[in-house]
Amino acid sequence: MNTGPELTSQALREWAEKLEVHLAYIQPGKPDQNAYVERFNQTYREVVLDANLFSSLQKVRDITEDWVEEYNAVRPHDALEGVPSYQYLTEWV
């Protein structure tokens, strides 16, 4: 049985159509159209997935939850005037 990406893509298209979800694809050869997601994936992979050994799915979830909290509550973001996301949200928005 072939369960390659073409079948996964078909299943995703059918699911999206059923729920009236619009899928927006990036143009071939234009990874910059997906820059925010690519940056997040890189950071998450380096800081969480590559830096830890996991004994269970729950351990992945726990470490991810801690990382998300630190990323948003502690880590300063250059694009947000050097303050964490949560602080920027409460002070500037």
Image: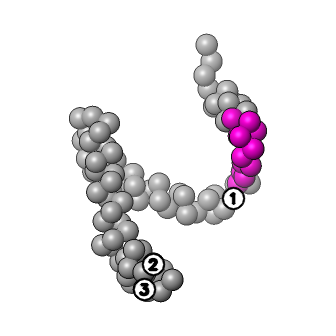
The residue identified by callout 2 is 89
Q: Which quadrant of the figure contains the N terminus?
A: top right
Between the C-alphas of marks 1 and 3, the distance is: 35 Å
Is 78 or 85 nearer to us in this picture?
A: 85
Q: Point out which mark residue 91 bears.
A: 3
The residue identified by callout 1 is 30
Is 13 or 17 nearer to us in this picture?
A: 17
Rendered image quadrant of residue 35: bottom right
Where is residue 28? Give x, y as percent: 72, 51
Q: Residue furthest top?
A: 1
Answer with left or right where residue 5 lies relative to residue 25. Answer: left
Answer with left or right where residue 28 lies relative to residue 84. Answer: right
Residue type at numbered disc 1: Lys
Where is residue 14? Give x, y as percent: 73, 33
- For marks 2 and 1 on the same chain, the one whose residue lies earlier in the sequence: 1
Q: Secondary structure at mark 1?
A: loop
Residue type at numbered disc 2: Leu
Where is residue 33? Give x, y as percent: 66, 62
Rendered image quadrant of residue 7: top right
Q: Is residue 89 magenta?
A: no
